[in-house]
Image (spheres, rainbow, N blue to C red):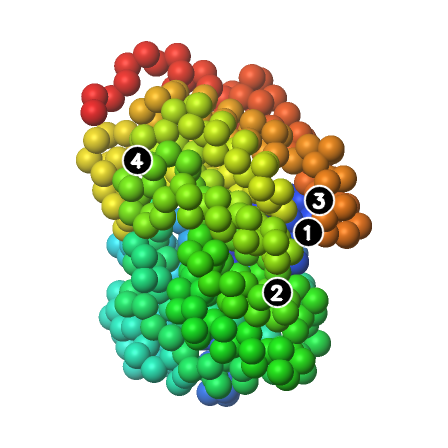
Amino acid sequence: MKILFITPASALRRLGAYRLGGKLYGQSNSITGPLILGGILKRAGHTVELYEELNQTVHYEKLIPWADILCLSVMTCTAPRAYELADRFHKEGHARVLMGGIHVTAMPEEALQHADQVMTGESENTILDVVEGRRKERIVKGAPVCDLDSVPFPDYSILKTPCQAANILTTRGCPFRCTFCSTSRMFAPYRQRSVDNVMKEIRMYHRLGFRYMNFEDDNFTADKERAKEICRRIIAEHLQFKETFFFGRTDIAQDEELLELLSKAHLTRILIGIESLNQDALNAIHKGQNIEDIKKAAEACRRHKIRVIASIVLGLDQDTKEDIQKTLEFACSIDAYQLQPAILTPYPGTPVYEELLSQHRIFEHNWSQFDMMNATFYPLHMTPWELQNEFYGAAMKFYTFRSAFRIGKLFGPEYFLRRFGLAIFARLGPMGARFCAAYIKRSPYYELKHLMTEDAAQPSH
C-alpha cells in the first residue's frame, strides 16, 4: 500500500515569514514518532512518504490520488488543520484516514469525527496491525513500550521535506509532572534506553551527514550519571555535532563534572524552564525548583559556555504583571541566548485544563489558538488582551538590537546574526497582531481585544 504521513502545521506556521523566523530560531527538524512508525511500515513492504508542513509547502494535488492511507500526527494547535486535511482526503481521494498523537490521545472521540480510526498512546506495537486491517476497532489503544531498545530508529529515508537536525529520544516520559505538561502524561511512565542503543543511533546520524542534533527527551539530564556516560562516549568516539540541543533542569548546576562533559560533547544549547521567579507560582505548578536553583543554573551554564534558552510561562494564577517583568529581567540579566515566552495554555488531559474548565475560565475553543502564543483563558490578575500584550512585550524587551551585539561577543558572529534577525521578527510579529486587533474584525486578535475586554463580566473563581 501507499502510505502518506503528514505532520500538519497551522495557517500561521505555514506562512513564509514564519518559516524564515523559524530558521533564525533553530535548525529544521522532524518529529520522531512518524519517522519511527513510517519506518516500521516501510520494512513491512509498504511504500511510505512523510511530509512536515512546518518546513515546506506540500502539494496535495499529487498526493491525494496517490495515497491509500493517510496518517496524521496531531497536536492540539494542529488539530483543526489535521481535520481539514482528513476531510479533504475523504472528499477528493480514496485514502483511509488514521490519526494519532498527543491531542488524539486526549480527545479520541473528537478526532473520530474526521478519521476512520484513531490510535491513542504509543503506537509502535499497533501501527502495522491497524494499517493491514487486523485491528478494526475505531479507537485503538496503544500501551507504553516497556523495552525502548526494541523500538526501531527513525527512518529519514521516507522524509520528503527539509531537515537539518536529527532528533533523538533517549527516554520517554519525565520524572516530574508539571501541571501544564501534556507530553509527560502521554508518555508515562518514565523509561530509558540503554546507552549502547543511544550511541548506535548517534553513529547513524553521523553517517547520514547531519551537522546538528537535538535530544528531545523531556529532561535529558534527569539521570545525571547516564547523561555523563552518553557524553563521555560521544567525546571518546569523536561523535560531536556542530551543536546539540537538549532539555534540562536547574539541578544541573549541582554537578560540575556533568557541565564540563556537556560542553565537551557539544551539548551547548539547553532549554531550561525558569517559568517564574515567584516561588508560589513554581510550587503551584509542581515545578520542583526554587529561585536560588534558577540563579545557580544560569551562572553555571554561562561559565561553561552553554547557551541557555530561557523558558518562562505567562499567566500563572500566582503571577502579576510585575512578576512577569521580574522574570523577564532575570532572563535578560543571565545573557540567555534565546527566550521562549509561553502563554499558559490549558492543553486537554492536563490538570491545568481540568481546573480552568471547571472554573469556566476557558473562553477560546478554536484549538489552533492553543499554541502557547495566544491567550485562551481568563487570567486572575489581568485581562486576556493584557496577557497577550505581556507576551509581545516580553519578546520585544528580550530581543533587542543591542543585545545582539552582546550575544555575538559571547558566542560568535553566527549567533549575532540570528539574534539580530529575531529582534526584527520580535517587532514585526506584534505589529501585525496589533493591527489585526484594531482593524481585522474576523481575526482572533480583534475578538480578544474588543469582545473579551469590553465584556466586563468576569467569571467567578
Q: Which amino acid type is shown beneath numbered disc 1?
A: Lys
**x, y percent for residue 250:** 44, 52
Q: Report crowding for label 1: few under 14, some 14 to 19, many 20 or more residues within 10 A (C-alpha).
A: some
Q: Is residue 266 above or below residue 351?
A: below
Of the pair 244 and 283, the residue shown nearer to us: 283
Q: Which residue is mark 4?
A: 280
Helix, strand or loop under label 3: helix
Q: Residue at x 62, y 83 (%)?
A: 236
Residue at point 59%, 37% (across, down): 333
Q: Is residue 373 above or below residue 38?
A: above
Q: Secondary structure at mark 1?
A: helix
Question: Residue 171: where, in percent of width, then height?
Answer: 41, 71
- In the picture of the structure, the residue carrying the numbered disc 3 is 407
Left or right, 204 with reference to 376: right
Instruction: Tell me the CA gap for discs 4 and 1.
Output: 36 Å
Q: Secondary structure at mark 2?
A: helix
> Does residue 77 appear anywhere in the picture?
no
Q: CA distance from mark 2 to mark 3?
A: 18 Å
Instruction: Look at 46% across and 81% down and name the residue there.
Output: 195
Residue type at mark 3: give it.
Ile
Per the image, the residue denoted by label 1 is 23
Give the mark nearer the N terminus: 1 vs 3: 1
